[in-house]
Image (spheres, rainbow, N blue to C red):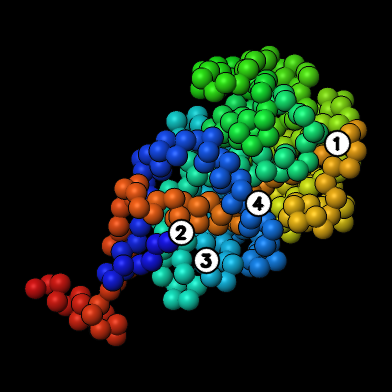
Amino acid sequence: MLTPSAKALVPFVSVEQMMGLVHHIGLPRVLQELAACIEEDFRRWPHFDKTPRVASHSDVGVIELMPTSDGVHYGFKYVNGHPGNMRAGLQTVTAFGMLARVDNGYPVLLSEMTLLTAIRTAATSAMAARHLAPKGARTMAMIGNGAQSEFQCLAMQAVCGISHVRLYDIDPAATAKAVRNLASSGLHVTACTSAQDAIEGAQIITTSTADKQYATILTDNMVGAGMHINAIGGDCPGKTELHPDILRRSSIFVEYPEQTRIEGEIQQLDPDHPVTELWQVITGAAAGRTDARQITLFDSVGFAIEDFSALRYVRDRIDGTTFFQPLDLLADPDDPRDLFGMLARAAL
Ligand code: NAD
């Protein structure tokens, strides 16, 4: 485990180092290990400080801070969501985050989290599907083939044993990109020409589209009995993907209801519409899928504990490697009260 050095240097993981770390371990294994890490933290859910994320909305997107603590460590992520960025050649979602010790407040890790968010979102989706999807599910429809999509497909393969993916995006170039990227994955990949075509024969549907509006990616007639829906794209007030009639027919599972009621698909329902917290399914305190014809919906918005799990996973995995650099982030005067003296001596 990493501890701050005598000079209080903070390990920093850049995008390049994160890519190195992922290739060093292997992406499927990272997805499996991170899904296990997230599940471990969901099992100890009551230990965490929890609050809906702090969101600053504008006409074009949102910037959010996502903090949590388990009493030993404190973590937060800075993340944005700007659906129009893609047209300017920028990512819709970018992020970085920090993990710190609670006992002295010193950071123990600063990390890029754009890649890590895609990986943790996919690991969370697959962990949820492992508990909720019909047994023996082998085919997933992947609607929205942007930055998150390949990670979602690979996590469902690595964690749930999915063997076929059916891809659809309103932009055929996005689908073509995902087909290329998944070519050596071992998945059977089919490019589809509509959402209806993509869900043909699928037991799991993942929606991962980006649009700052109430969109209808799936209508009620498209969703048959027994399906599991993994809806990750609707994650802001006024931004949803599913027709409300689908929600009324589904058993709905959420991360943190206080946040999901503001941001998730369920913002379209009455505020007291029943939902089940996923952590309770994992601990056995609540039922998950109870019947083969049941439609299960994971109304995912992304919660701070998943980022905390991802940060502690990276902190443990970089130990003994070169996939980080020590950062001079914290003032470290010889006498803790002589901050000014430290500055004055630097002039000499
Ligand atoms: P992206 O912009 O890279 O990709 C989105 C894709 O959706 C684009 O290719 C676009 O053409 C496609 N699309 C838009 N409308 C569509 C429609 N009606 N039908 C089919 N395809 C459509 O975005 P991304 O980084 O892949 O993120 C996707 C969504 O997931 C975003 O809304 C983001 O905020 C959300 N997200 C959620 C979580 C979470 O934890 N739940 C985490 C990360 C991102």
In the rendering, at what x and y percent does residue 233 appear? 66, 38
Between 103 and 97, which is closer to the camera in this rendering? 103
Nearest to N terminus: mark 3 or mark 2 = 3
Q: Image height check: is 261 above or below 186?
A: below
Beta carbon of the mark 2 residue lies under 8 A of ligand 1? no
Q: Which residue is mark 1?
A: 295
Q: Tell me how far mark 2 sits from mark 1, CA to CA.
A: 37 Å
* Amino acid type assigned to the residue bearing label 4 in the image: Glu
Q: Which residue is mark 3?
A: 74
* Amino acid type assigned to the residue bearing label 3 in the image: Tyr
Q: Which residue is mark 2?
A: 98
Q: Tell me how far mark 4 sits from mark 2, CA to CA.
A: 20 Å
- Secondary structure of the residue carrying tag 4 is helix
- Secondary structure of the residue carrying tag 1 is strand
In the rendering, at what x and y percent does residue 167 appear? 65, 21
Residue 114's disc is none
Residue drawn at x 87%, y 53% is: 274
Quadrant in the picture for the C terminus: bottom left
Nearest to N terminus: mark 4 or mark 2 = 4
Marks 4,2: beta carbons within 8 A: no
Q: Tell me how far mark 3 sits from mark 2, CA to CA.
A: 8 Å
Nearest to N terminus: mark 4 or mark 1 = 4
Marks 3,2: beta carbons within 8 A: no
Binning the other alpha carbons within 10 Å of mark 4 as few (below 14), some (14 to 19) or many (20 upward) gives many
